[in-house]
Image (cartoon, rainbow, N blue to C red):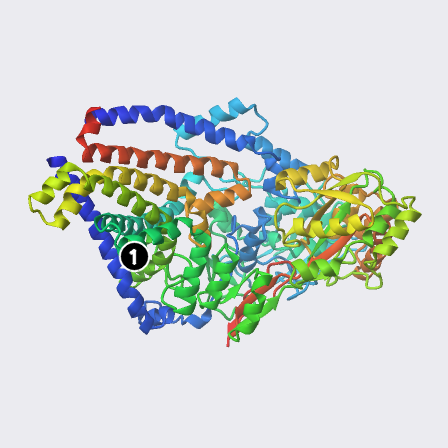
């Protein structure tokens, strides 16, 4: 009897709670209809000066992994790091050209081995300590010393290692403070992209005091000199940044607060933008473009392209070691058709491996036009009048990438065209990690699709990293080895004059075009969207831009 | 009752060990080099080797397993590779977010499911019966993804009644103490925020609760129908007790055991299976936490996350078993 009563009262209690909840929700929808949902609450609210219009809410697809930009490689993490930290140099708004940031000016020695930086004076970290030459030395020591006590459990400085050479082959020999505001970098060998590298968000200068005090927790509570001060992080949900009132750029930032929210689903993010819950969204799906353009309250924003998606040949395999065969197939890829079908026009056909917005891009190179007759003819000249014998394995990405939203479908289009000129391919798409492994080994695939997003805005980061013979087997998946190209790329690395370097890279692109180890397919332009009253937002090709110029009209 | 409880607890031990073995083996059967996936295309060979060493990926599998088990017993769930934060610390807010959503969704599902089931059985073959069974059929077959987006479109975009994403008004947040925002806003005495938190809960919990609601409704109905035809119900009716009393008191008690099973199973399923809902509504729950760990090959997080979900599932089943015993004395004595 006792048990009985207990169970029925439990049930009643449960029902009671639910009725109460349901009652709340029913009444609620009615009453909130009367008042504007968000702003109404704020008027009576406890937040004093901040009206909605000086808080920017950004919606993006993923969360940061960590907030210390030195230990991360993902774009989402760097995006926040960019607001909190300044590097010695930075990229001019909307480009990849460098300009001074924490360093006001610099000199390079004749031999390219010594860089002297004059630092900006009177800059303070968010914790109130002074920025000076010692802070710069402290940070570079932290990144380069494998036994640094500020390299915490599980951390490694990937970008330092990859841009300035791993332990054992470091580019930077020494960083020394000459006086309070002068720093001298001595290099082991000249590095053409050195300044370009220094401007990366990953080399943002952190407060030494904060690193010492917070230790392992620094990655959760970052302290830099940037335009925004880190306030709060709710993982997978939101990151709140507040205006740095002592920012060294006079009068900036214009916003009081930025809240960056993670909203993984593209459609949901777009819904939130339309309903006014967020002001700016990243990664608009091209399918939503029509809706966006028909809504006068919203605006479309394009990010300059900094990537390439390509079809690579495996030069270890017959007959793709023959440049004539590669040329023939280059004429059989319908780039514009692919862009129209799968990119909703948000991409440009790629001619060269580097994106057209980058300095050193060779405008005079003509692309191989899409012409199947020409392709057939070239195949015949290569000794295959009836098409290639046998069937070849074509690896297509199993996951969407920024440079290729649907690799398999693109591969199918290419497959159909190849079939018309007598080249039979079968498409394979193993799981992503396996895919990368196998393409790198180059045993199973005859051709493959892949892409690259630039790190530092330097052509070296595309051409040398992806196509030099030194890059076999790390990123040169085509096993393309050209000594002629190698000489030019190395010469460009050792050169400090940007004009001369640009010339060398233009030559390099000519060689690559003639050898055709790849068919470059597209450079995509990522789409963003914002409320129409959001002004002053200039997206950067690197994927991270300052929010300090943004304001509401 | 006590011996029953002990017996149940004892049975759990091999289940828990089995769980660790299964979780461990599934993850190690996945192909591909985790070091490569974690560090990405741009990593150097040296940093990859360092990482393999650090993760113990170079050790034989049994050694990896026992290290893992030992750490677990110490309460160490490992450190996330992606975020470099201890998982035991990192996972709490996610669990709280999931708990809040699951409880709200199940409250919705149980209230509407059980009542619809009872009334359908009571008024069998009435228009209410037909409609509610049709609704539950649609409910079971509705893709959550679609339902969620439609809800957002209607209630947030078109009508503007409810917020479409997140857990609270971020412009004016409440300090996170328990990470259960309903409780946090009450603790802070922020009644305005409590109301926004409730509003944020409505759409995702309806989306998440629809399938369980439909299943519960169907189960309740068929179970009630069986009981309603039994002798003791007829007797109760013959005694002249009110219909309502007969249905909700006498019949429901016996009909409730299978329903309880379904509720338990569904609650467990929601814990880790809310990935879609959490994705659409940008809800920072544990399902998404694990899902994202999978795409970045964050082995420790996948292992510990799945293990915790499995553990909670086992606990919920235990509670359901104990509830059986409370509702039906025959079970205790078996």
Q: Quadrant of residue A289?
A: bottom right
x and y, in percent, of residue A160 in the image? 64, 46
x and y, in percent, of residue A550 in the image? 54, 70
Q: Residue at x 79, y 58 (%)?
A: A351
* Chain bearing mark 1: B
Q: Quadrant of residue A122?
A: bottom right
For this rendering, which residue is in front, B41 or A426?
Answer: A426
Q: Quadrant of residue A26?
A: bottom left
For this rendering, which residue is in front, A94 or B314?
Answer: B314
Circle 1 packing at 10 Å, graded few (<14), some (14-19), many (20+), is many
Question: Given the current orientation, which residue lies at the most extreme front position?
Answer: B125
User: Where, quadrant-wise, is the N terminus of chain B in this rendering?
Assistant: top left
Q: Residue at x 28, y 42 (%)?
A: B222
Q: Is residue B235 left or right of residue A30?
A: left
Q: Is residue B53 left or right of residue A23?
A: right
Q: Is residue A64 above or below residue B271?
A: below
For this rendering, which residue is in front, B252 or B14?
Answer: B252
Q: Is residue A313 left or right of residue B233?
A: right
Residue linked to disc 1 = B185
Q: Is residue A540 left or right of residue B18?
A: right
x and y, in percent, of residue B272 in the image? 41, 42
User: Would you say residue A408 is visible in this rendering?
Assistant: yes
Q: Is residue A479 above or below residue A238?
A: above
Q: Residue at x 11, y 36 (%)?
A: A2
SS class, disc 1: helix
User: Where, quadrant-wise, is the C terminus of chain B in this rendering?
Assistant: top left
x and y, in percent, of residue B149 in the image? 45, 59
């Amino acid at each position: 009897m006792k048990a009985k009563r207990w169970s029925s009262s439990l049930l009643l209690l449960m029902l009671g709670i639910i009725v109460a909840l349901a009652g709340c929700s029913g009444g609620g929808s009615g009453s909130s209809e009367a008042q504007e949902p968000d702003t109404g609450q704020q008027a009576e609210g406890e937040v004093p000066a901040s009206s909605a219009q000086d808080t920017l809410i950004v919606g993006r697809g993923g969360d940061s992994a960590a907030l210390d930009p030195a230990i991360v490689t993902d774009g989402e993490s760097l995006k926040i790091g960019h607001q909190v930290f300044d590097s010695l140099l930075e990229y001019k708004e909307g480009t990849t050209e460098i300009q001074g940031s924490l360093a006001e000016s610099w000199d390079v020695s004749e031999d390219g081995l010594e860089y002297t930086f004059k630092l900006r004076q009177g800059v303070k970290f968010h914790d109130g300590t002074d920025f000076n030459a010692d802070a710069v030395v402290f940070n570079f020591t932290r990144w380069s010393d494998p036994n640094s006590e500020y390299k915490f459990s599980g951390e490694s400085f990937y970008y330092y290692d990859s841009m300035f050479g791993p332990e054992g082959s470091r580019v930077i020999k020494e960083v020394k403070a000459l006086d309070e505001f002068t720093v001298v970098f001595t290099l082991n060998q000249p590095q053409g992209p050195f300044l370009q590298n220094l401007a990366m968000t990953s080399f943002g200068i952190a407060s030494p005091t904060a690193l010492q005090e917070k230790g392992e927790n620094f990655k959760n509570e970052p302290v830099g000199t940037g335009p925004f001060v880190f306030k709060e992080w709710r993982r997978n949900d939101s990151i709140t940044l507040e205006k740095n009132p002592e920012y060294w750029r006079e009068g900036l930032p214009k916003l009081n607060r930025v809240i960056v929210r993670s909203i993984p689903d593209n459609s949901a993010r777009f819904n939130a933008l339309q309903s006014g819950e967020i002001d700016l969204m990243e990664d608009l799906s091209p399918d939503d473009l029509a809706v966006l353009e028909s809504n006068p309250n919203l605006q479309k924003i394009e990010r300059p392209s900094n990537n390439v998606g390509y079809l690579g040949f495996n030069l270890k395999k017959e007959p793709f070691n023959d440049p004539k065969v590669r040329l023939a197939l280059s004429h059989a890829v319908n780039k514009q058709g692919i862009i129209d079908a799968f990119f909703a026009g948000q991409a440009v056909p790629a001619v060269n491996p580097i994106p057209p917005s980058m300095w050193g891009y060779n405008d005079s190179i003509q692309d191989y036009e899409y012409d199947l007759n020409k392709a057939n003819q070239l195949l015949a000249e290569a000794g295959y009048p009836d098409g290639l014998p046998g069937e070849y394995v074509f690896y297509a990405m199993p996951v969407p990438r920024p440079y290729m939203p649907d690799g398999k479908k693109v591969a199918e289009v290419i497959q159909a065209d190849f079939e018309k000129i007598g080249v039979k391919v079968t498409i394979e798409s193993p799981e992503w990690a396996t895919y990368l492994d196998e393409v790198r080994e180059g045993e199973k695939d005859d051709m493959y699709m892949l892409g690259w997003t630039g790190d530092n805005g330097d052509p070296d980061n595309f051409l040398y990293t992806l196509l030099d013979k030194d890059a076999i087997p790390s990123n040169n998946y085509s096993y393309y080895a050209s000594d002629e190209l190698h000489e030019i790329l190395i010469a460009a690395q050792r050169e400090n004059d940007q004009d001369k370097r640009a010339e060398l890279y233009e030559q390099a692109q000519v060689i690559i075009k003639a050898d055709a180890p790849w068919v470059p397919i597209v450079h995509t332009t990522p789409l963003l969207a914002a409320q129409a009253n959001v002004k002053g937002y200039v997206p950067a090709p690197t994927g991270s831009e300052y929010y300090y110029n943004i304001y509401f009209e | 009752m006590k011996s029953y409880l002990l017996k149940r607890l004892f049975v759990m031990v091999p289940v828990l060990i089995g769980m660790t073995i299964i979780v461990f083996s599934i993850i190690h059967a996945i192909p591909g080099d985790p070091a490569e996936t974690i560090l990405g295309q741009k990593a150097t060979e040296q940093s990859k080797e360092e990482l393999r060493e650090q993760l113990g990926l170079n050790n034989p599998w049994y050694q990896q397993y026992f290290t893992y088990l030992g750490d677990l017993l110490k309460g160490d769930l490992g450190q996330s590779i992606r975020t470099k934060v201890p998982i035991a610390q990192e996972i709490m807010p996610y669990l709280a977010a999931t708990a809040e959503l699951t409880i709200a969704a199940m409250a919705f599902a149980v209230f509407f499911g059980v009542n619809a089931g009872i009334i359908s059985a009571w008024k069998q073959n009435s228009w209410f019966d037909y409609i509610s069974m049709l609704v539950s059929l649609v409910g079971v077959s509705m893709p959550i993804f679609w339902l969620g987006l439609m809800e957002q479109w209607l209630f947030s975009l078109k009508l503007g009644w409810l917020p479409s994403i997140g857990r609270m008004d971020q412009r004016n947040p409440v300090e996170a103490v328990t990470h259960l925002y309903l409780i946090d806003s009450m603790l802070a005495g922020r009644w305005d925020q409590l109301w926004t938190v409730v509003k944020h809960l409505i759409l995702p919990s309806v989306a998440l609760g629809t399938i369980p609601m439909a299943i519960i409704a169907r189960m309740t109905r068929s179970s009630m129908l069986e009981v309603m035809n039994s002798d003791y119900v007829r007797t109760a009716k013959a005694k002249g007790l009110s219909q309502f009393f007969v249905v909700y008191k006498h019949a429901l008690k016996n009909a409730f055991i299978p329903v309880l099973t379904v509720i338990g199973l569904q609650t467990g399923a929601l814990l880790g299976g809310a990935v879609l809902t959490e994705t659409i509504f940008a809800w920072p729950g544990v399902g998404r936490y694990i899902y994202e760990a999978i795409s970045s090959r964050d082995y420790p997080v996948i292992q510990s996350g799945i293990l915790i979900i499995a553990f909670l599932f086992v606990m919920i089943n235990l509670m359901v078993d104990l509830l059986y015993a409370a509702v039906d004395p025959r079970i205790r004595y078996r």
